[in-house]
Image (tube, coloured by chain):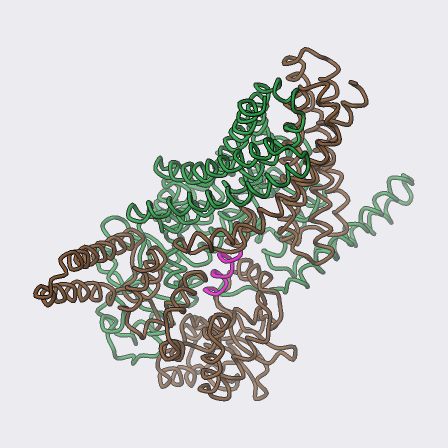
Chain colours: A green, B brown
Amino acid sequence: MAEANNTQSEEKLKQHLEQVLELLNKQRLEEAVVQQQAMPRHQLVETLLHKQQQAALKHKLDQLHSADIAYILEALPLEQRLLVWNLVKSELDGQILLDVSDAVRETLISDMDRHELLSATEQLDTDEIADLAPVLPEEVMQELLESLNHQNRARLESVLGHEEDTVASLMDFGMVTIREDITLGVVLRYLRRRGELPEHTDKLFVVDKQNLLRGVLPLQRLLVNSPDAPVADIMSRDVVSFQLDADAEDAARAFERYDLLSAPVVDRENRLQGRIGVDAILDHIREKSKEDMLAQAGLLEEEDLFSSVWKSAKNRWFWLAVNLVTAFLSTRVIGLFENTIAHIVALASLMPIVAGIGGNTGTQTSTLIVRSLALDLITPANAGRLIAKELSIGFLNGAVWGTVIGLFAWGLYGDERLALVMASAMMLNLLLAAMVGLAVPLMRHKLHLDPAMGTSVLLTAITDGMGFFIFLGLATVFLL
Amino acid sequence: MAEANNTQSEEKLKQHLEQVLELLNKQRLEEAVVQQQAMPRHQLVETLLHKQQQAALKHKLDQLHSADIAYILEALPLEQRLLVWNLVKSELDGQILLDVSDAVRETLISDMDRHELLSATEQLDTDEIADLAPVLPEEVMQELLESLNHQNRARLESVLGHEEDTVASLMDFGMVTIREDITLGVVLRYLRRRGELPEHTDKLFVVDKQNLLRGVLPLQRLLVNSPDAPVADIMSRDVVSFQLDADAEDAARAFERYDLLSAPVVDRENRLQGRIGVDAILDHIREKSKEDMLAQAGLLEEEDLFSSVWKSAKNRWFWLAVNLVTAFLSTRVIGLFENTIAHIVALASLMPIVAGIGGNTGTQTSTLIVRSLALDLITPANAGRLIAKELSIGFLNGAVWGTVIGLFAWGLYGDERLALVMASAMMLNLLLAAMVGLAVPLMRHKLHLDPAMGTSVLLTAITDGMGFFIFLGLATVFLL
């Protein structure tokens, strides 16, 4: 399929969803009527009406693009989702399974038997089967593997043999290869004989007999140059290619940097293995930014909008438990100073400010560091300068906000010693927050851990605990 | 330029950066020597050495792609950045200004005079000039406008007349248009005569005499069909096109959904106005996810890694001030209960837990709602179900974690009444957090405000303040 069929604007898409919901509701009303009346002589009529409704729904769905059906399935509660899913043309099943989110895919697959799954997946390309592999039942996967020819089985095993987030996991095999010793005219005749080109073909790959990548021939050059010219003269030898096990994120940045539409994937000997397209890159970027967002909010994975309460709750518990443990540690810090608080109750009111603003400034620093690390902008040569800068900002922030808060505490409680303790605690905690905001992502990066994940939990735990400790500790020393 | 020149792998790119830094360091060392000795008779030799170093650096830079130079400029401290910037071939200036981040762009532009800016921007396409327009000095912009021909001026004004984040702001004008009544053979001859095609051309746009969009002809179809076939028979009439003022985010989702590489942009009468390419979509998605990340961390905009401490501090103050105000409000809630705390000091230790976990669960809920809103998955028909589900989870979480924390408080202080108050406060605050996590993004969406921005600040302010109020309030009523 060289292009999308029946593609929709965002608005029309919403209308489609509403129409499907309307049809579903009508059907439900009728079912309710049937159940309420439960009169045998009516049954025939009702079944007919029900069938009519279902036919209307099926007609509606038949007109839609697989990606649009995927969108509608996402927005439907479970029982309605399965009802619609069973009405979908079975030749779209595979494509739709690829298009829905992981959580919804699970609900759809659990509704399909072995036979349905096989016929849905058999229509897919090798790289698409690889995408579904983790969620397919073992025996379906086995049968699929057996149904593939030698080349496709080798390809599937190659993709599955590489880790997620490598170039291999994003590649497809829709590549057209040519030799460099023929003319463009021969290439044109070859393409015409071949018929349809793989989706997203913007360039042909030039390889030699050993399948070594020699260059690429953009379709544009093929079109604007004389048919008599040999491929070798017209092709580009300066090719951005990616190794199978290269980091997908690096490939994504190269696609952005050089505005690529597709690029060859090669093995260590530069033999052509596959192709990576900008559509896979786009999906990868969205997926990563979604994962970051979920992780930041303390969610393990994306939830099906209509999954059970129990399932959703479990998705949220891991990080809540982690936060509870860190909160527990801060309370124990406060517990050390209960005697001090009993003497000066104002401390209880003021202490959350010191801890909170510490967490905020630390997060600002760590976010910028995480981003710079992701963009590869931090080198040993400039790291020193960067650290000096962040510490200076921490100091400046401490001086400014410490003064503001000290004045505020003075105004509130009229106690200049309390105000001084508050200001100093603020200053120290903001400096500490800057150090932690620097150290945590830099260390995680050095240890080859993802600098983003977990940084904020660790950071807040430290700034909270230390914030309480510094403030209450200073108060104990100077005010008691 | 149909493809990237001298494109680099991520690793090689880092090596280039290191080499540039090395050359810069050598130069600095020599300058230091020159300054230390300050002997006139040596000066000639040193200047020669210095020149040699500079020539080596220039040679290095001349081999690099504009996007790679942009990357190196980002990673260099200000004075070294400007040194490199002045050595860059001037014909790359415009492209590099487009490639660097906003913050670095500012530093580069402030180092250029009117003449340099004009010659850098004059080589750019109309849509690229539009991207730079906000940061160009008024008089340069004026001169640029005057230098453009009628069509390009109209195009530039059209782009600048639309808001950011509309399709118009992402479009370019690199489109090739044809008529439907000619044959593919004529199209092929036309393209060959025309020579190079605009970057990223994957399809030709078919328009009539009034410039109304009739269809698109993918290059692939042009290649595989007979030259005798008329365009009208081969072109696709089912075109995904976008209105000038459509939301860029909607376009991005359509690109993902239908795996598009480029699409026509039309006005309300369906007249072809421009083209939107997947490269612009990719940039847009990265830009948005970057903005979300920065906003979430409480930063106004991206910082140049090496901007002054003062400038960076100002970037961070707005949200720190907002957080300070909300923290102040929570302390006033605590202040109301200082008498209670003076009687039962344990409350001071325990209260941060109730507030903190409330903020965490509320953020989980609001993140999922914000995401579902962004994907257009929430409709009036399913909103009720969703709200019921989130409240159930809030209730379940409250029961589970309330019990855990109640038991923990009991173990710690051996007071079962305190434990009961703690458990009930936890329960109520988690239920409240779920409600706020639902209400804030849904209301912001209804009011056509960005549901993400500001949600977390508002949410934490409410869960903190109410968390303290519920816990200390219950304690005052039942424990005093």
Q: Nearer the viewer, residue B47 or A246?
A: B47
Residue A227 percent location from the top left of the image = 29, 79
Q: Vertically, is A163 above or below A189?
A: above
Q: Dividing the picture into quarters, in which one does residue A444 lie? A: top left
x%, y% of residue B473?
77, 27
* A199 horizontally vs B362: left or right: left
Residue A362 pos. (x, y %): 49, 40
The N terminus of chain B, quarter of image:
bottom left
Number of numbered labels in the structure image: 0
* Magenta stretch prevailing secondary structure: helix
| Looking at the image, residue B257 lies above or below residue B404 | below
Q: Nearer the viewer, residue A302 or B52?
A: B52
Residue B292: x and y in percent read 55, 52
Camera sees residue A408: yes
Q: Residue at x 47, y 80 (%)?
A: B139
Q: Is residue A402 magenta?
A: no
Q: Quadrant of residue A241?
A: bottom left
Near-viewer residue (A462 or A352): A352
For image coordinates 54% across by 84% down, the residue present is B154
Please name the residue shown 25% across and 71% down the image: A231
Outermost residue toward the left in this view: B41
| Magenta-colored span | B278-288
The quadrant the C terminus of chain B occupies is top right
Vertical position of residue B329 compared to residue A17: above or below = above
Q: Is residue B443 above or below residue A361?
A: below
